Amino acid sequence: MMKLHVSMLALALGGALCCTAPGLSRAADQALPTKPAGPMSKAADKAAKPAAAPAPAKTAAAASTVSTDTVDAYIKATFGKAPADWQQRIVPDETMQACNKYRNDVPHDVGDAIMKREITRVVYPADGKFLGDWKAGAKIANNGQGGQFSDKPETVHGGNCYACHQMAKSEVSFGTLGPSLTHYGKDRNYTEAEIKQAYTKIYNSQAVVPCSNMPRFGTNGFLTEQQIKDVMAFLFDPESPVNKE
Amino acid sequence: MRPITAVSAVIGIVLCTIPIVAKAQDASEKEIERYREMISDPMSNPGFLAVDRGEQLWAEKRGTNNVSLESCDLGLGAGKLEGAFAQLPRYFRDADRVMDLEQRLLWCMQNIQGLDTKDVVTRRFSGPGKISDMEDLVAFIANKSSGMKIQPQLSHPKEQEMAAVGEELFHRRGGVMDFSCSTCHGAEGKRIRLQGLPYLAGTGKDAQVTMASWPTYRVSQSALRTFQHRIWDCYRQQRWPAPDYGSDGITALTLYLNKIAAGGDLAVPSIKR
């Protein structure tokens, strides 16, 4: 039990930290406290293991025994019959190229370059309002449809936030790939700076955490501005179950 | 990293609510585990119907040459089935290619039987009123390796290339969500919704258990499914394009995964949710 407490603490902290300092955010997103110092370090070290993402750091060195050209040739042979616009979707942009190359564990300068590039790809609401309707946001967070080759093109996309995050306490079916977001707005005192930062992260996670596992919902055109605002309200409205329960 | 430790003492106070969550999670995990045990009874596994149909198909004369598949070499010699699946994918000299079981079966259909495989490929995944030869044949042949250990073949340079490409593909991000296989399977002990995710970015029990359980009967789909289907469905959920059936990318991923699953005890066809 104790282990679990502390590891969830690490996750909660991860969530909190990624919205304060970009330098820290990288570590926070991956919840990988490597060598904590101080009296709690032993417990934190142990607890970090289940919560950590050991893959990128360990395997990065073993990467690239085959050339990118070879891998690309396999990809063409495997997905080459898909419609052209679908194939286009798996051509990595500059940011994904970097994340692929380092298996998400990018050096600091590469990470900085990613954030610098991706922040220019964030479009903030023209009306200056970040928060929509939390009830609509709750539905978007619960909807895992859209964007699959089995979906009809007109399918309304969902954010599928619960696949990875805990949000409202009443929803017990939630994933653990991302940190828990319960009391998200409340814990951040509903401040304007935190609201803008969260909008940035949902719109383009790479602008905040280089090689974050989270999709770039706005920049990749997966969610509309209104949908993002609604999800934002789900996180930040004081009446939302995220902050109430 | 120091700031994390520094702040952690302060945040510790907030933690009093977390045990309730953990308890609820434990309870649901146990329920899921109970459900898995309930459905994993091999005596009531409809996957064995596919095994029986596959046995008949294996011996059936078809194609312009009107011969059966019984002389098809799956790597251990013509017609030798015991243990063949445990060593696939592997390099085949006659085709000068590394193939998984499904690629090899298609090759034998074309080259030994003279069978036009277009129809077989159209029925690659079964559905209502649509029986899949491939699912049945794979169930039959894989079952002949049940109880044996996964033995990845990595001595030929082409096998080594396949495994290396498979590892790269596992980590390659793309699609409108920027997902890769490792997004979900890159860390230990993670869940998507309530579904536990096997860690497949390195060796370990997760990889062994996962790879030793395909092909499987999917209760939710009322069908026996092969690993080709599993990868196809993973790419669908990743928002990638549909991978071509029997393509080299899937074989590469399969060989990489068998490499990290080496030594796993095959128990197939298994039965899953």
Image: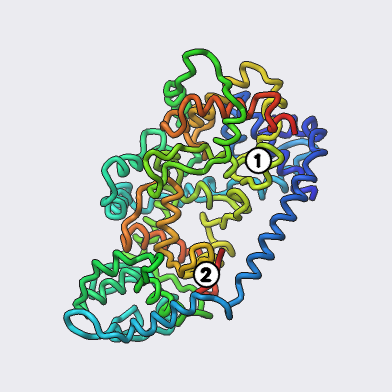
State which quadrant residue B139 falls in. Answer: bottom left
Q: How many marks?
A: 2
State which quadrant residue B164 falls in. Answer: bottom left
Dot label at residue A166: 1
Where does label 2 land, which residue? Answer: B213
Residue at horizontal 61%, vertical 50%? B191
How many neighbours does mark 2 have within 10 angstroms: few (below 14), some (14-19), or many (20 or more)? Answer: many
Describe the colour scheme in one phrase.
rainbow
Task: Check chain identity for marks 2 and 1: say if they share one.
Answer: no
Vertical position of residue B92 compared to residue A195: above or below: below
Position of residue B57 measured from the top left corner of the image (x, y, whole percent)? 34, 81
Element assignment for label 2: loop
Position of residue B9 measured from the top left corner of the image (x, y, whole percent)? 79, 33
Position of residue B150 measured from the top left corner of the image (x, y, whole percent)? 48, 73
- Taking depth in this image into account, of A106 and B54 the one nearest to the observer is B54
Identify residue type, mark 2: Ser
Identify residue type, mark 1: Gln
- Taking depth in this image into account, of B163 and B100 the one nearest to the observer is B100
- The nearer-to-camera label among 2 and 1 is 1
Q: CA distance from mark 2 to mark 1?
A: 30 Å
Q: Decide if residue A165 is in sight here.
A: yes
